[in-house]
């Protein structure tokens, strides 16, 4: 896209997107949890539960370990901030976003990496057995998931000869509907990465505190109150972001491309909601159907993802599609 | 006139010491004689620069750029070595390894040796050249066996027999040369062995005969150069004699021998244009480089170590002369200079180090840098220089040689590469622990003379960064008539 | 066959004699008789020189003949005999290669030497060009002898006979070298012998024997 | 840009001269820390800054030549200052400024080389590197190149009493020398029989394809050995930890880049137009090295070894970029080639700042605690905040996280990989995109490594009681750290300006300047914006804004009450520092995943051990598999050769005899 001094409408879209993401993320998380509950014949918690959780945490007094360093207190804000910015880059409703030219897909991956690094560092800061254990596992997951995600994006970028995410989805959305075997491969890879990165079964179980298995939770053990709230919110945002990336890459239709008008936006919102609903259900389904892996097996799981992504690239170069 | 002085002074010195060598200030007198020789040599150099080549005494003596720079070099190293040997021999006496009588012999033979080398360098008569070379052997044999230890006797014996036999071959070569020359220059004999005349008619000399002659000469003088596999005497002779002698043997005698070989090569190459002589030289060179490098690996005795390194460097020089061409020849001449300076300075430091540690075994020499930093740094820098690390002059010549080889004889470069690598590993791996680390060495009764060491290293450094124009002019002049324009 | 003039016949006879003596030395194990053989060789050399001098009428050859007699027939053998008596070395031990083998090798060497001499003999205009091959042969045989012997003394004698061979070569190829050179060479040989004399005593007092296997300690091979 | 009052070249030479003087100044009072530390090193830092300023100013001006009055008779030393040299001079000046200031506070009296002498060696090191960049003929280049090796060798062996350090120094100098010889051979090829060793002559010389390829491969061998590419990397993890930290910083941050410089100079300048397939070699080697370095760094337990391996990784990335640009250039794709080259140069700049920063950080830690072993550190962020936060900056940068500089070069590299499927060669254009995966993997591993590095050293609880007495670094050290940190930030936030500077080089070497088609000053868009763009400043401001707003919001709508209490630790009581992950523990996943890379030996405790004890040693397969056999081979050959010298004079005579016979026979048949 050419550099245009962002007009008012774009600014609005941008802000709107971010706010929407902030608002929708916990809701999406709640929705997923609800689906999981239904699928496993349990009474579903309220879909608003995540909100309540967050508000409750904000009200509480923060308790810090004696030897917690400033880094420990900064980390939540950084993680949260990066997730919000990420939400601003990903074209969930419209593709003409002012922020987008400042950060393409590679930068997006970088953002996620930043968040992960700060999370892990914060986890190591207090120096508990669990914290370091969580950090180690998180980084292990990360260093395999990150290149996989990068490759996924790389395939899409090669197809559409750009690394700017909106441009990619525009390209994919606007051109004639065709079959992309490479994208099929990468879609699988992406799903695996999504599961791993968002601490879902089979890699991690968000609902357990069993030290043998937990990864993400182990890192948050020392957090409380507003810091914990930000962390939770951030992870909800991350799930939401990943979902939106998935939409942008694999089901880009319905996003307001070209010059955005209020109408286009208005149209794109219900589409997005629909996508989210479906995606949430699918995610819950996957989680219920699959069993938790031993942590030692996680690398194999991610290696598969990486492999699929690379295969996708290969296929693309071979078949040019 | 200067030439006469150059030859007369050392000869006189030999005589003088024959009578009063046992005096206390013998060392100073020795220095004085060497200094005189050196000054005379400088004067000679100046004359050559101003008036060109010199032919004196019925053409019996001949001075051209090629040998005048060797004469100066020889005189200079002779001077510095005598400076070094002053405290060194004092310490040896203090340690009771030599008696006054032996010291007399030492000084007398030292001057004698100088004389023979200068004679060999300046004579125009191939026969006299041979005589002088043989005399050089004889005068050093007694120096090698100065300590009368079993090892030194064995070394002396091997040195004597091997070099004697080798030199005998050279004599036969000379005879054949004479034979070939006589048919061109007429049978009146006298001129037929004069190098200048031979050089004048070299294109008419009989190739078949010269080929044989060259083989005999090469084997003969090559033995003294220490070309593998004729080198066997060299490490023993270097290791067992007093260190000043090792210094001059390695720094000067080998040069003189190479000088002889090159003189012959010039004649032969002029006579016939088959690449045989240069091939032989290159073969000898490479073989020496490789064998020298691998021999280095097993050394325990520090002087043997550097003796083998001399073999390696002689190999490099011979290889370069073999390649021929102005660049390689220039490099070879430069290498002769820097090698003799560096190697002798190394032997100086080695001598002091060995005296401090009371042993020549490298395992007993430790942490020189802690006890006497100057000796330590001298050895370290010397070793780095001899290993061909810039900005020392050795690197300059090796730079030219290797780059030339890469274009002219690419097949040889892998061999050189391996050999240089191995040599580096061997020497440096040995030198480092001697220089660095803890030490338990002892102080010496007489302060070591390190002026020569650093003087040499300074010159080598200079030659690496800046070759004075007149020196360069010599080299090029010499190179142009050895290696052809 | 064409009838050669007397002097040439003499020269050829000398040449043959040289070769014969060389072989004799190669086979001889008593050091005393080695010395004698060496002296004889010197005599033959002197004779050759004389004949050549008479034939060519070159003055300096007479002188060199005298020199040869003085040094190689008289002085050196005397010195050697004296050394032998002083040092009590009469026999060389068993050579490294047995006599017959050495002989065989020597034969091969002679053939090789003649092959070498071919190009030279074709050019030589001297009376006794055929002798050049023999000269080379003598040198190489002396070399062989030095290799195979174990006693310092016999090695030295080999060295000296090699010198003889060289002179014979000079004589046969070019009627001798210029005077300066001959003098120088003779001088060297003399000095060499003196040095050797010193040597022998030093070695003797160190190892109380002149056997070379004492002199095998300096080596790389453990 | 403004032109200088005097020629930039002479100014550079002047700075080098000043350095020499400063170095010699150290000899005035060799033992005086005050003179060396408080006077000479700060001055030399000023010189460095001056040098970098000159370099920046001389970027745009056309190349200058000069001939020095020293050198060989027919070959006086030529010097030349062009854009390429300027960029690397900038690198040298800028990072050495920080390092020198740090060193001023760092060097203390003690064992080993006296400070004055070290000052001399240090400055000779700087000068030689500067001269490498200016050299315009083979001789000058080689002299500077080897002088660099020697001076750094002496700096490495400062603590020569320790045997390991002597060993490290020996291996280092040996590898350096072998590499130098092959560089020498390379020049021998390049001069093309013209016997002129000036670079101009080499540019003019026309080489056959075979010769050219040989030259390129020799160059790769020689410079690769210096850059520590696998399998010539063995000296690097030995030498870097052995050296004093400022020296490690200088070696890793600057010296390794000289190899990249040499490679670029030879390939694009002297060899003219490279053939495309040449590039595959450095590409492959670079990829292998980057992965190898990253994996090994992840399992190290010595903090300086860790950084050394990470240097291998980064140089691997640089060479990957270089190889890519060679492939593109050979295939006639100019713009991608320029992009890849720019990425390479950018990465060199970045790495020199980041790695120097980290090495200096380890230096301060070493001084404060006397510990290099990660297993005995921890919690230092409380004791030494300056070092900690500076190191954090460096760690984030080297982990390639936006908006810092490490990310920019990775971004550029990936962007240039985007073109790789258009290479007009079947199979190659299929393989190269694959290698993107390796790059991505290496980059991700770098993140892992850095979390381990920073987390284990500075976070958590101190693993030893002695750490309680650790103190933060002095004022001068802080200056150094901050300088380098700011460098990282600047390179991260102003990529457009840096790239503009770099495009002088690409224009000079390839005739292509990376266009910023009408994109604003804050937006990095080397390729059409439609395709990719990156505006770190905006990006950074956006993030900062969000964070600020969040903080603000939290403060506004809620309280900020904070209580300090014991760590909860999931309710387990009695936690000790021993319960944290050790360095080994943190590396464990990598050990499992990449088991085949290492040769591991473990000592596991049995259940019945009175004092259970766990030990693990990880060794480099290449060292075991390549170098040790090589050493044994040489030893065996030496033994074989030694048989020749077996002491018996008859045998020696036999040699002479044999030689004589053989040569005579030769003469006879010819």
Image (cartoon, grey):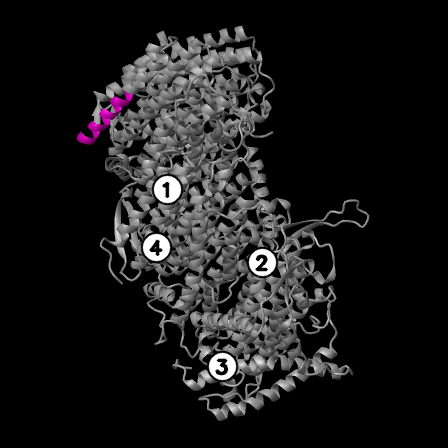
Observer-nearest of B315 and D350: D350
Same subunit: marks 1 and 3: no
Secondary structure at badge 4 equals: helix
The residue labelled by disc 4 is D52
Secondary structure at badge 2 equals: loop
Whether residue D138 is situated above or below residue D277 in the rendered picture: above
Report the magenta residues as a range: B37-50
**Mark 2–mark 3 contact, CB under 8 Å?**
no
Task: Classify residue A291 by image quadrant.
Answer: bottom right
Q: Which chain does tag 1 point to?
A: D
Residue A15: give its label.
3
Q: Which chain does tag 4 point to?
A: D
Whether residue D52 is situated above or below residue B331 in the rendered picture: below
The answer, for residue D396, to whether it is visible in the render is yes
Residue A69: give its label.
2
Same subunit: marks 4 and 2: no
**Placement of the N terminus of chain D among the 4 image quadrants:** bottom left
Label 2 or label 3, whichever lies nearer to me, is 2
Q: Is residue B40 magenta?
A: yes
Whether residue D112 is situated above or below residue C26 in the rendered picture: below
Same subunit: marks 4 and 3: no
Marks 4/1: CA–CA distance: 19 Å
């Amino acid at each position: 896209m050419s550099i245009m001094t962002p007009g008012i409408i774009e600014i609005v879209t941008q802000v709107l997107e971010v706010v929407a993401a902030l608002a929708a993320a916990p809701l999406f998380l709640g929705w997923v949890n609800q689906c999981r509950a239904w699928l496993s014949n349990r009474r579903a918690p309220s879909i608003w539960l995540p909100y309540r959780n967050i508000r409750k945490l904000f009200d509480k007094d923060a308790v810090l370990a004696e030897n917690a360093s400033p880094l420990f207190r900064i980390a939540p804000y950084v993680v949260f901030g990066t997730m919000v910015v990420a939400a601003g880059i990903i074209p969930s409703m419209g593709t003409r976003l002012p922020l987008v030219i400042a950060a393409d897909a590679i930068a997006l991956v970088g953002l996620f990496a930043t968040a992960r690094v700060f999370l892990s560092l914060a986890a190591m800061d207090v120096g508990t057995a669990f914290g370091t254990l969580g950090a180690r596992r998180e980084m292990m997951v990360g260093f395999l998931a990150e290149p996989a995600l990068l490759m996924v994006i790389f395939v899409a970028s090669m197809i559409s000869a750009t690394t700017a995410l909106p441009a990619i989805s525009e390209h994919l959305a606007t051109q004639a509907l065709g079959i992309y075997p490479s994208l099929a491969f990468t879609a699988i890879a992406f799903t695996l990465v999504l599961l791993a990165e968002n601490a879902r079964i089979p890699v991690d179980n968000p609902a357990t505190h069993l030290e043998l298995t937990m990864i993400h939770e182990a890192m948050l053990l020392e957090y409380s109150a507003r810091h914990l709230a930000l962390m939770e919110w951030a992870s909800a945002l991350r799930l939401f972001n990943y979902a939106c990336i998935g939409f942008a890459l694999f089901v880009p239709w319905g996003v307001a491309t070209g010059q955005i008008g209020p109408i286009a936006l208005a149209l794109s919102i219900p589409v997005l909601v629909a996508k989210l609903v479906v995606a949430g259900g699918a995610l819950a389904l996957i989680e219920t159907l699959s069993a938790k892996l031993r942590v030692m097996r996680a690398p194999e799981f991610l290696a598969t993802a990486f492999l699929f992504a690379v295969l996708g690239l290969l296929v693309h170069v071979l078949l040019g599609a | 006139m200067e030439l006469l002085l150059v030859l007369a002074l050392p000869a006189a010195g030999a005589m003088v010491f024959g009578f009063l060598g046992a005096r206390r200030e013998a060392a100073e007198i020795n220095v004085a004689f060497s200094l005189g020789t050196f000054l005379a040599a400088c004067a000679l150099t100046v004359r050559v620069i101003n008036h060109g080549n010199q032919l004196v005494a019925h053409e019996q003596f001949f001075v051209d750029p090629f040998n005048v720079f060797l004469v100066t070099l020889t005189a200079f190293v002779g001077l510095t070595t005598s400076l070094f040997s002053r405290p060194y021999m004092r310490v040896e006496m203090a340690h009771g390894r030599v008696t006054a009588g032996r010291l007399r012999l030492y000084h007398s033979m030292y001057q004698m040796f100088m004389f023979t080398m200068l004679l060999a360098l300046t004579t125009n008569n191939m026969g006299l050249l041979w005589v002088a070379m043989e005399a050089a052997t004889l005068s050093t044999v007694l120096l090698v066996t100065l300590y009368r230890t079993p090892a030194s006797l064995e070394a002396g014996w091997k040195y004597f027999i091997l070099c004697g036999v080798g030199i005998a071959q050279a004599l036969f070569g000379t005879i054949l040369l004479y034979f070939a020359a006589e048919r061109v220059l007429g049978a009146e004999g006298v001129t037929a062995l004069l190098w200048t005349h031979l050089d004048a008619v070299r294109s008419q000399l009989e190739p078949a005969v010269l080929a044989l002659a060259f083989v005999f000469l090469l084997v003969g003088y090559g033995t003294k150069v220490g070309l593998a596999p004729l080198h066997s005497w060299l490490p023993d002779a270097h290791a067992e004699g007093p260190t000043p002698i090792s210094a001059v043997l390695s720094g000067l005698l080998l040069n003189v021998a190479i000088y002889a070989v090159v003189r012959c090569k010039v004649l032969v190459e002029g006579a016939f244009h088959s690449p045989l002589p240069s091939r032989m030289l290159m073969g000898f060179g490479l073989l020496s480089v490789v064998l020298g490098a691998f021999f280095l690996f097993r050394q325990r005795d520090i002087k043997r170590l550097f003796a083998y390194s001399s073999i390696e460097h002689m190999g490099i020089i011979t290889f370069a002369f073999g390649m021929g061409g102005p660049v390689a020849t220039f490099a070879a001449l430069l290498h002769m200079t820097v090698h003799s300076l560096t190697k002798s300075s190394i032997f100086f430091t080695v001598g002091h180090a060995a005296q401090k540690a009371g042993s020549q075994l490298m395992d007993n020499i430790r942490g020189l840098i802690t006890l006497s930093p100057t000796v330590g740094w001298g050895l370290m820098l010397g070793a780095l220089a001899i290993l061909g690390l810039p900005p020392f002059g050795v690197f300059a010549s090796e730079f030219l040689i290797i780059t030339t080889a890469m274009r002219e004889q690419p097949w040889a470069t892998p061999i050189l590469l391996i050999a240089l690598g191995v040599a580096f590993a061997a020497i440096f791996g040995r030198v480092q622990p001697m220089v660095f680390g803890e030490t338990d060495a002892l102080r010496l009764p007489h302060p070591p003379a390190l002026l020569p060491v650093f003087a040499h290293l300074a010159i080598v450094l200079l030659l690496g960064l800046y070759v004075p124009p007149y020196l360069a002019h010599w080299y090029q002049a010499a190179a142009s008539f050895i290696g052809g324009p | 066959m064409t009838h050669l003039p007397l002097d040439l016949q003499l020269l050829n006879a000398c040449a043959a004699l040289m070769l014969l003596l060389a072989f004799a030395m190669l086979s001889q194990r008593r050091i005393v008789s080695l010395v004698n053989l060496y002296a004889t060789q010197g005599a033959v050399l002197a004779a050759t020189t004389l004949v050549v001098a008479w034939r060519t009428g070159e003055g300096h050859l007479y002188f060199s003949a005298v020199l040869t007699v003085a040094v190689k027939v008289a002085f050196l053998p005397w010195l050697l005999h004296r050394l032998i008596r002083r040092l009590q070395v009469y026999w060389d031990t068993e050579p490294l290669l047995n006599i017959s083998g050495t002989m065989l090798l020597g034969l091969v060497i002679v053939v090789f030497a003649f092959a070498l001499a071919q190009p030279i003999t074709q050019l030589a205009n001297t009376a006794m060009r055929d002798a050049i091959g023999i000269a080379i042969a003598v040198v190489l045989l002396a070399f062989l002898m030095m290799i195979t012997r174990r006693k310092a003394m016999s090695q030295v004698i080999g060295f000296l006979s090699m010198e003889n061979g060289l002179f014979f070569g000079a004589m046969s190829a070019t009627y001798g070298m210029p005077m300066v050179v001959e003098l120088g060479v003779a001088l060297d040989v003399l000095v060499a012998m003196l040095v050797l004399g010193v040597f022998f005593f030093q070695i003797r007092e160190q190892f109380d024997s002149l056997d070379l296997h004492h002199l095998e300690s300096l080596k790389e091979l453990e | 840009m403004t032109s200088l009052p005097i020629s930039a070249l002479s100014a550079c030479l002047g700075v080098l001269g000043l350095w020499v003087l400063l170095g010699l100044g150290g000899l005035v009072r060799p033992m005086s820390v005050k003179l060396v530390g408080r006077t000479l090193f700060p001055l030399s830092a000023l010189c460095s800054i001056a040098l970098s300023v000159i370099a920046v100013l001389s970027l745009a001006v056309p190349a200058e030549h000069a001939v020095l009055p020293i050198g060989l008779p027919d070959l006086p030393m030529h010097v030349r200052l062009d854009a390429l040299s300027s960029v690397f001079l900038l690198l040298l000046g800028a990072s050495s400024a920080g390092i020198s200031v740090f060193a001023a506070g760092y060097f203390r009296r003690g064992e080993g080389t006296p400070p004055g002498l070290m000052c001399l060696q240090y400055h000779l090191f700087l000068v030689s590197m500067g001269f490498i960049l200016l050299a315009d003929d083979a001789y000058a280049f080689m002299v500077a190149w080897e002088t660099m090796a020697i001076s750094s060798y002496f700096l490495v062996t400062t603590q020569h009493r320790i045997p390991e350090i002597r060993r490290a120094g020996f291996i280092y100098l040996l590898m350096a020398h072998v590499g130098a010889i092959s560089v020498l051979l390379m020049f021998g090829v390049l001069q093309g029989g013209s016997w002129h060793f000036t670079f101009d002559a080499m540019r003019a010389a026309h080489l056959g394809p075979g010769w050219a390829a040989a030259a390129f491969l020799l160059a790769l061998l020689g410079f690769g050995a210096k850059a520590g590419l696998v399998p010539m990397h063995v000296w690097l993890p030995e030498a870097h930890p052995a050296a004093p930290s400022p020296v490690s910083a200088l070696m890793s941050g600057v010296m390794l880049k000289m190899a990249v410089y040499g490679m670029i100079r030879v390939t694009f300048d002297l060899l003219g137009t490279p053939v495309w397939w040449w590039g595959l070699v450095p590409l492959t080697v670079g990829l292998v090295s980057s992965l190898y370095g990253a994996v090994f760094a992840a399992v190290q337990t010595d903090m300086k070894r860790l950084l050394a391996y990470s240097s291998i990784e980064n140089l691997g990335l640089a060479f990957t970029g270089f190889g890519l640009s060679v492939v593109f250039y050979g295939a006639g794709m100019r713009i991608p080639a320029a992009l890849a080259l720019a990425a390479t140069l950018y990465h060199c700049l970045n790495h020199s700042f980041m790695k120097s920063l980290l090495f200096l950080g380890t230096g301060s830690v070493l001084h404060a605690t006397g510990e290099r072993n990660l297993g005995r550190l921890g919690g230092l962020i409380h004791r030494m905040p300056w070092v900690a936060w500076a190191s954090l900056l460096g760690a984030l940068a080297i982990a390639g996280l936006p908006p810092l500089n490490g990310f920019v070069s990775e971004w550029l590299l990936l962007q240039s990989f985007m073109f790789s499927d258009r290479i007009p060669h079947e199979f190659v254009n299929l393989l190269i995109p694959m290698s993107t995966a390796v790059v991505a993997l290496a980059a991700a591993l770098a993140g892992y490594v850095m979390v381990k590095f920073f987390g284990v050293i500075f976070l958590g609880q101190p693993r030893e009681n002695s750490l309680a007495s650790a103190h933060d670094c002095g004022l001068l050290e802080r200056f150094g750290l901050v300088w380098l940190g700011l460098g990282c930030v600047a390179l991260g936030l102003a990529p457009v300006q840096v790239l503009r500077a770099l495009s002088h080089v690409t224009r000079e070497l390839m005739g292509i300047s990376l266009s910023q088609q009408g994109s604003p000053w804050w937006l990095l868009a080397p390729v059409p914006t439609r395709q990719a763009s990156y505006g770190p400043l905006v990006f950074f401001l956006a993030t900062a804004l969000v964070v600020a707003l969040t903080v603000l919001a939290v403060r506004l709508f809620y309280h900020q009450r904070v209580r300090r209490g014991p760590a909860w630790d999931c309710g387990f009581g009695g936690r000790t520092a021993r319960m944290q992950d050790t360095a080994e523990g943190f590396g464990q996943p990598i050990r499992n995943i990449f088991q085949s890379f290492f040769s591991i030996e473990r000592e596991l405790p049995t259940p019945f051990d009175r004092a259970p004890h766990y030990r693990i040693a990880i060794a480099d397969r290449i060292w075991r598999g390549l170098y040790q056999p090589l050493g044994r081979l040489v030893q065996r050959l030496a033994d074989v050769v030694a048989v020749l010298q077996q002491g018996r004079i008859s045998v020696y005579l036999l040699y002479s005899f044999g030689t004589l016979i053989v040569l005579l026979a030769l003469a006879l048949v010819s």
